[in-house]
Amino acid sequence: MYEKVVSRNPGEREFHQAVFEVMQSVGPIAEERSDYAQWSILQRICEPERQIIFRVPWVADDGKVEINRGFRVEFNSALGPFKGGLRFHPSVNLSIIKFLGFEQVFKNALTGMPIGGGKGGADFDPKGRSDGEVMRFCQSFMTELYRHVGEYTDVPAGDIGVGGREIGYLFGQYKRITNRYESGVITGKGLTWGGSQVRTEATGYGTVFFVEQMLQARGEHLEGKRVVVSGAGNVAIYAVEKAQALGAVVVAVSDSGGYVVDEAGIDLELLKEIKEVERGRLTEYVERRSGATHVTDGCIWDVPCDIALPCATQNELDESAAKTLAANGVTLVAEGANMPSTPAAVQLFQAAGVLFAPGKASNAGGVATSALEMQQNASRDSWHFDETEARLQEIMSEIHDTCLATSDHYGAPGNYVVGANLAGYVRVADAMVALGVI
Ligand code: NDP
Ligand code: 2IT
């Protein structure tokens, strides 16, 4: 079946990788649920329900017309409307959007909330672009996307390169074209125009809540642990914030230009000022903080730590990085990003007895809080920060327990990859069986 997926989707390396990883886990299900084969569940799950590719023309500040390629892959809507982020990054192509959409299906199922899976984006590079350029790009992108999305159809959100600013421009254009204030069409909105408390923090916080659960299951805590977080974007910043709040010492963060080591512990206010306010580079961090160093050779995983949280991008942690981490005594790795560890790295962690949480479980707090935003929009309500954070914490704890129980049930106790894949898979598969051949 894997070979068929490869030949039907030639050259889509990241998509193949994500499918392979799930297929490797589902063996035990085939025995227990022989009815799934009759329904061709595995084949159907690997085929997106709909894939949309479109031209995005826009005018740059210098008057030149720029062209980008937009994508929305509506992967599976058995459990609810398609749900998943939009990524704006020059590396975006169909393979990357399909791998992300595929992962999203199982992640969203794991949250237990009524959301299907999808993903979208464009090969647009927001770096160095003015607010006006970003706005015109977003407006052009939505001018095509609006006909495919909706509160009950497909609900986008943010991902790499798409934060509050972009969500605002996208929602504004949707509202203008449709003449409807349909809050539930997109999540990650601002707090004064339909957004939810904690959505900004949710993925990073959720990842750290998941880590706490993993540690607690073994009688340990984050307090005093040495943590390395890759990335310096939305997920990374709020992973640092919650890890520090729970008493960990975060000694390194990174961006695509290198990494910073700060043995005294990352100065979060400075990091936020540089990344969220100024949209600057990490080199500026060391200019304003004595004792910190900026490193451009090697990689962030050379920094010894107890806990590693990859929160930047796919395949950023390879086998050699995993070897270095393990040799330096890492005891736990939890993915804040989507598929940041290569398959060889995951294997190495598992063989070395390093606790490992796959992104589809540990980073599910973002999309879960998006589902909470949808709930608030549907009931025209808004909840307080503490209440919303408590819901997030509860959801992460349920996901954690589900993964552990499922790994036990299928004879791989403590294997969070098996637990997450199988628990997510069964939820989607059962809904697909119930809804018939569609
Ligand atoms: P941001 O755009 O806010 O930040 C991305 C960070 O990762 C930046 O520091 C960026 O550095 C770095 N980065 C991105 N691409 C590369 C690359 N090719 N090489 C090196 N560094 C890179 O994105 P998010 O924080 O939102 O997303 C990070 C990860 O988390 C992604 O994998 C995303 O899919 C995943 N995720 C996000 C969720 C969310 O709610 N936002 C939810 C669940 C998962 P630079 O600025 O230099 O490019
Ligand atoms: O990868 C992800 O889960 C996200 N980028 C968030 C998706 C969402 O709909 O909030």
Image (spheres, rainbow, N blue to C red):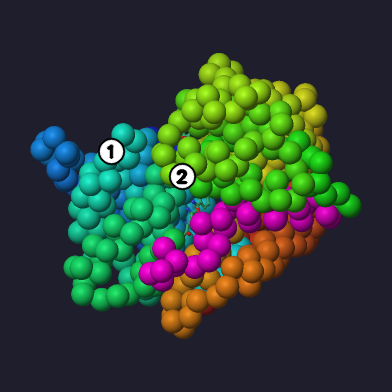
Q: Where in the figure is residue 194, as x and y percent of width and height?
A: 41, 71
Query: Which type of secondary structure does the marked residue at label 1 adopt?
Result: loop
Badge 1 or badge 2: first in the primary sequence? 1
Q: Which residue is mark 2?
A: 276
Q: Which residue is mark 1?
A: 129
Point out the stretch of residues depicted in magenta.
190-217
Say if residue 82 shows up in the picture. Answer: no
Asked whether, in this view, residue 41 is left or right of residue 302, the answer is left
- Magenta span main SS: helix
Say if residue 154 shows up in the picture. Answer: yes
Bin the neighbour count of mark 1 within 10 Å (Cα to Cα): few under 14, some 14-19, many 20 and up: few
In the rendered image, the quadrant that contains the C terminus is: bottom left
**Above or below 326: residue 368:** below
Q: Where in the figure is residue 125, as x and y percent of width and height?
A: 32, 37
Residue at 41 percent of width and 58 percent of height: 157
**Above or below 24: residue 327:** above
Query: Which type of secondary structure does the marked residue at label 2 adopt?
Result: helix
Name the amino acid, label 1: Arg
Residue at 83 percent of width and 54 percent of height: 216
**Front: mark 1 or 2:** 2
Q: How many marks?
A: 2
**Above or below 158: residue 288:** above
In whole angstroms, how far apart are the C-alphas of marks 1 and 2?
A: 15 Å
Residue at 77 percent of width and 24 percent of height: 327
Name the amino acid, label 2: Glu
